[in-house]
Image (cartoon, coloured by chain):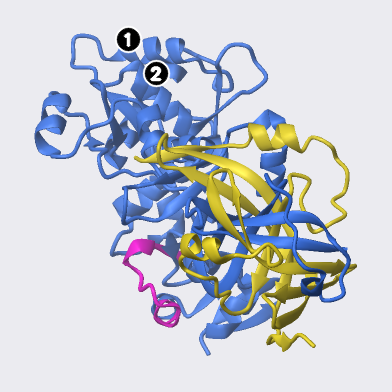
Chain colours: A yellow, B blue
Amino acid sequence: MPSVKIGTAQWQKLTQSQEKQTTVITPLGITMLEIQGDLELPKDFTALTQGDSHHEGRFSEQDGQNIIRFGLLQLDGEKATLFVGKKQRLLGKVTKLDVPVGIMHFSSSDNKVELVDVVKYKIIFKDRPLPIM
Amino acid sequence: MSINLHSASEYDPSYKLIQLTPELLDIIQDPAQNNQLRFKSLDEDRSEVVLCSHDKTWVLKQRKHSNTVLLMKEFVPEEPISFDETQLFGLSKPYMDILSFAKTESEFETREAEGQLNLDAVPMYDGELDFRERATKKSSARIFETLEELLENSPCSAVEGVLKWYKIGGSVKDGVLCILSQNFLSKALHVLLMSVMAESLDLQRLQIDDTYEAVGKDIEDEFNPYTREIIRTVLNKFAVQEQQSQEETWRLRIPFIAQWYGIQALRKYVSGTSMPLDEFLIKWKSLFPPFFPCDIDVEMLRGYHFKPTDKTIQYVARSTLPTDPKERFRVLFRLQSQWNLEDIKPLIEELNIRGMKIDSFIMKYARRKRLGKKTVVTSR
């Protein structure tokens, strides 16, 4: 029977302090962001990277891969505002999950599962985007 | 205060979200239970995946959604990221950068469920001489040799698996993991009781070796199917292992044994025909080994009999009753027009799959009334 153990030791070690989580970002620096709808990002980063001007600062390189800066997030208590690109603005909030979720990493190379983090809060954007004025 | 949001060009698909019930959360937070959780499934692609701890099992159900759920992590940019202030839309300069590394399209819901043993490759043993040969010849699938192997191959936790194994009379014979047939188990129990009583062993403190020897004495010169393992199986089913004592000792579950004999008596004497209750009690008592110290009461056989008249009794096999609640109640009322609540309960309980209060469940299909101290159930 295929079976696989879930490694939890590392997560336990990293989150030993019993302090209550006070921000939406977990002590390990992970955030869950939910948008009801799609987030459209350009398909081909490499071609666009060439044309990126300094004052836009959209593209950069991190750990050998191209990444795109798609927006700005502002958190004000429970309220959250997400600015996407230059034109859209979403209003949302920080909510507690009904049931906390564990982020599991399934490694196909060595057939291991590791618990990466436990998320108890998320930032959710339920409404239609508004224009940036 | 604002945060810069970045996205990778491709998301890593190897991250999955799993709902953690308070119990699961406790397990993963407890260093003593490190690495105890595991995923199990019967085969690579088709069957359900379960999540098992040391003693519990959860079924996983994939809940898909169409929202964009991004998992983002904090990072320190290799090169400082700068852009025009016009793009800040009046916000202060970002103090942090986070990068979405995974996008999830589903979440796995966890629901506690009863773990199951996978008995497809476990043959039945009925006391045959050449069991191993037969078992290996007959089954095209692999056979298991140890309980550990079976547990490894079953969608259940270790503790649940072992308890179930004891309950169904699981054993090892000639190096083949097997289940003892009802018939053989009854014989083995009978021989065991006779032998331990003949040797005047303490029924509250039985040990494997003494019991095995006692049984062996009675069957000299003959083929003895009652190996140590079979004795252990019988004790695991009909006795409770004492936890406190240093030696492994078992205490016989006398009322359970009495019920077991009672069910045999029902099958033997009142299957398809009824008998006066007094006469049945005598027949039941006659099945026990002589001088076996137990009390019997027809209430022990709830769920296995009905009373065609006030003073007669007849066997009813639950497996032959309809599985539709409405139909089952109809059949039960045809057998007996009025039931004590306690008597009918075990015959219908298994159909209450929604977990309603049993009284409300009965009221859905029948009428309930109080007669003095008793509650009786009749048809509508």
Q: Is residue B261 magenta?
A: no
In this picture, which residue range is highlighted in magenta? B312-330
**Viewer-nearest residue: B146 or A17:** A17
Determine the secondary structure under disc 1.
helix
Query: Which residue is drawn at the image coordinates 44% and 80% (left, top)?
Result: B333
The image position of residue A127, as x and y in percent, is: 71, 85
Identify the residue position indicated by label 2 in the image: B195
Determine the secondary structure under disc 2.
helix
Is residue B186 visible in this depiction of the protein? yes
Indicate left or right for B82 with B52 as reference: right
The image position of residue A126, as x and y in percent, is: 70, 81
Is residue B290 visible in this depiction of the protein? no
Using the image, determine if residue A77 lies above or below residue B57.
below
Using the image, determine if residue B261 lies above or below residue B22.
above
Q: Does the magenta stretch include residue B328?
A: yes
The image position of residue B105, as x and y in percent, is: 51, 66
Same-subunit check for callouts 2 and 1: yes
Instruction: Kindly give the residue lying farthest to the left in the view shown.
Output: B137
